[in-house]
Image (tube, rainbow, N blue to C red):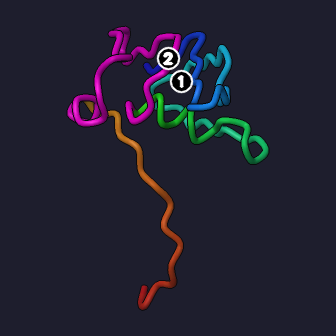
Amino acid sequence: MLEADDVSVVYEGGFRALNGASVRLAAGAVTGLIGPNGAGKSTLFGVLAGAVRPAAGDVRLAGQTVTRHGPAWRARRGLARTFQLSRELSSL
């Protein structure tokens, strides 16, 4: 359903956040991604969601290449990123 092949991201100053990362995510599957701080997890999510453009590699959604499409285009097709917000619940 969602695939990334050989994705690399290089930030200003030559910092390489991802170097040839690949992932295949099946429809309906629950998948976790773990790693130490600075391992590139958030960068990979940014690439998948379209917020970060890779220097190399390809992202596909349902077999269609979406690498050069931005977050709004991807969201209209069902791919969006959410962020964790930690706060107390005033009531349940």
Q: Are marks 2 and 1 in contact (CB under 8 Å)?
A: yes
Say if 40 sits above or below 68 in the image.
Answer: below
Residue 13 occupies which quadrant of the picture? top right
Residue 76 x %, y %: 20, 33
Q: Which mark is residue 47?
A: none
Residue 72 x %, y %: 23, 36
Residue 61 occupies which quadrant of the picture? top left
Quadrant where the N terminus lies? top left
Q: Is residue 18 left or right of residue 68?
A: right
Which amino acid type is marked by label 1? Answer: Leu
Which residue is at the front of the view, 40 or 11? Answer: 11
Q: Which mark is residue 25?
A: 1
Of marks 2 and 1, which one's residue comes earlier in the chain?
Answer: 2
Task: Check if residue 28 falls in the magenta segment.
Answer: no
Where are the magenta residues, as a range? Answer: 50-76
Which residue is at the front of the view, 25 or 64? Answer: 64
Which amino acid type is marked by label 2? Answer: Glu
Task: Check if residue 74 falls in the magenta segment.
Answer: yes
Crowd rating for badge 1 (residues with CA inside 10 Å; few <14, some 14–19, many 20+): few
What's the residue at 52%, 11% (across, down)?
57
Q: Is residue 58 left or right of residue 32?
A: left
Residue 15 occupies which quadrant of the picture? top right
Indicate which label's residue lies in the foreground, 2 or 1: 2
What's the residue at 40%, 34% (across, down)?
49
Real-space CA distance between mark 2 and mark 1, rounded to the nearest whole angstrom: 6 Å
Residue highlighted by disc 2: 3
Quadrant where the C terminus lies? bottom left
